[in-house]
Image (spheres, rainbow, N blue to C red):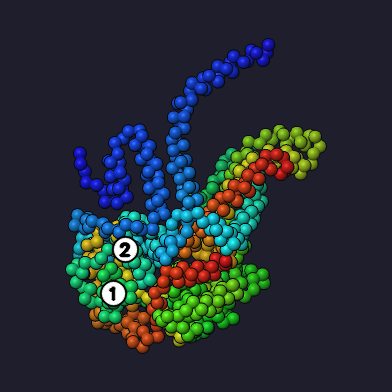
Amino acid sequence: MAFSAFTPTEQKADASIQKRSPVALLLLLPGVIFLVLFFVTPLLSLLLTSLQEPVPGGFFGEYRQALRWENYVFVLETYGTQTLRSFGYAALASLFALLIGFPLAYFIGITLRRFPLLQALCLVLVIAPFFISFLLRTLAWKQIFAIEGPVAGFFSMIGILGPGQSITGTAFSVVFGLTYNFIPFMTLPIYATLERLDLRLVEAGGDLYASPATTFRTVTLPLAAPGVISGTLLTFIPASGDYINASRDFLGSTETAMIGTVIEANFLVLQNYPAAAALSIVLMAVILVLVGIYVKRSGTEDLL
Amino acid sequence: MNRPLPEDPMVRSLIAHARRGQVTRRTMLAGTGASATALALAACAGGGSELQPAEDRSESDPTLNWANWPFYIDEDDNGNYPTLEAFQEQTGISVTYNITVDDNNSYYATVRDQLALGQDIGADTVCLTDWMVSRWIQLGYTQELNYDNIPNAANLSEDLRNPEFDPGRRFSIPWQGGFAGIAWNTEQVGELRSVDDLWAPELRGRVGVLSEMRDTMGLILMNNGVDISGDFSADDFNAALDIFREQVTGGQIRNVRGNAYTEDLVNEDTLAAIAWSGDITLLNFEAGYEKWKFVIPEAGGTLWADNFLIPIGSPRKTNAETLINYYYEPEVAAEVAAWVNYITPVEGAREAMEAIDPELAENELIFPSDETLANTRIFRGLTGQEENEYQAAFQSVLLGA
């Protein structure tokens, strides 16, 4: 009886959805058109470009449509190291950003909860770097790390840096730059979840004789997981495709080229569009797989 | 209502396409499909039909966009360009001077798609290096100069009138020329004479070289005793490339950069570098004393010129020619040369310079003697295949691949 009482209403709801659907579709149209124009079309064009072959006897940078799958083999053989390096750097940067961003978010979202003004101020401080172009900020780090600059001077004084060694142009400076640039992207989503965290749950953990560490591990962390996951994604995905920090004009050198740098060089200098397109597709595919695994794993509680 | 079609060839063809079909649902759908295909094809098209120069609207449109390299025109303390201001006053043409060229390749890459479609690239004249100019001319991306509008072209230096890539200067005319050589910080480094001196152990990690392949590789090749203007072989190139690779992977060379290499010299990340002649004079001027010194290596330096071109899609050709004509006045050329310190292609500029600054008139980097010129070479034109191979090999070093 109880169940049958619900059935008619459900049917009615179904019908009303169906009746509304043409309007709903119409409302979806702008979004769909946008996606087709600015996502599907470029993606298709990218895919087609990645299969092009050079025009025999043609000019530098002249290509024609073909089905040259070898382009993928070529880029993976030639730029395998740079591809792996990108994901390694991006993973490191995400990890460091998490190590810095989580306590920061915790402090702002939970410790400062009783001082709204201070909380707002701290949030502004996290976002403040965005008011300056990140190119300028990265260039500023290059100056700070310059050989005759204060940091390198100190390091060589205490003997960490030998003669002829430098901070810029190393893996350290590139990962540093990535971490620095992406900290806000990590901090803000975590803050958003921690800010809404019901402190009574933490209190209950204490009441049940859990140590603060256990409470943190079994209560706070799982509740903050959505923020941590979106923070890592927001950091890892753009960081693996980043071409500024690792560029020779910023914090990198010839030994720190990441996949973004390679794509840039192939596109702008070598005019090897198929290789650049193939690398972009590889980058997208790998990110999709990695992120898929990550989200699936963290969706179950295995990860935590 | 019949309005004239817009200039832009792509918009034009789209409008024509739209007018052709009556707009029923079926033709509209077909049209969408066709234009999507057209866009996809346009993206891959390398050329095909002959490009037509844009119609010249200079008469009704007294403006001009000029794309150029950094530190490449006279500038006063307020960041204004005195010769350019005088030009605007004299002719009433208002010029937008854009410093958008940092590297021939990357500039080309940003405009090539529009060029291939014959569209306006936002520059009515741009100054690019010989070998890149050669590529533009071969691809038909330039408009032929009308020398009736450039009577001062008679002042063009005799030896620059018939380059291999543009005999008779139909499509291009030099802006400035210069040398690539070696430069060093005189406070920290003793005198350098050859490229080999850059590989000295005490300079480890403090040497910068240019991302312009022809200059960096040119100097190394010449240091190996190869004549870069002659018919050198791939083996010669590879031998030089091995040296370059060894110095990069070994950590001797700190960085490989475009025009921004001067930043590294200033913050002393690099103490010695392969450099362009005029930049060093300018850095010294900014420092207030002769902090850096530039020489052409004993084994020889490279000689190049950057040339005015008028891109195929520019609707302001006459304005561009008026500008070129103005900069071929010896007095104006001397004024520019006195600031940028590159070689001026204008005959009579030396005499004009004596009035401005007699000391500069003796400057070998602006008015090189035959002796200096004899020690420099122009990198020979590369075939398409050589260009591909050499650039790929050079870039593989820069990417550590």
Give the SS element for disc 2. loop
Q: What is the x, y in percent for residue B31?
A: 36, 40
Give the SS element for disc 1. helix
Viewer can see residue B87: no
Viewer can see residue B347: yes
Quarter holding the C terminus of chain A?
A: top right
Depicted A85 relative to depicted B29: above or below = below
Counting residues from the start of the chain, the first of labels 1 and 2 encountered is 2
> Which label sits on residue B167?
1
Q: In this view of the protein, which residue sits in the foreground, B344 or A280?
A: A280
In the image, what residue type sits under mark 1?
Pro
How packed mark 1 is, by other alpha carbons closer than 10 Å (few <14, some 14-19, many 20 or more), is few
In the image, what residue type sits under mark 2?
Gly
Q: What is the x, y in percent for residue B396?
A: 54, 68
The residue at 49%/57% (across/down) is A274
The residue at 66%/41% (across/down) is A296
Quarter holding the N terminus of chain A?
A: top right
Confirm or deny contact between disc 1 and disc 2 (CB under 8 A). no
Q: Residue furthest top?
A: A1
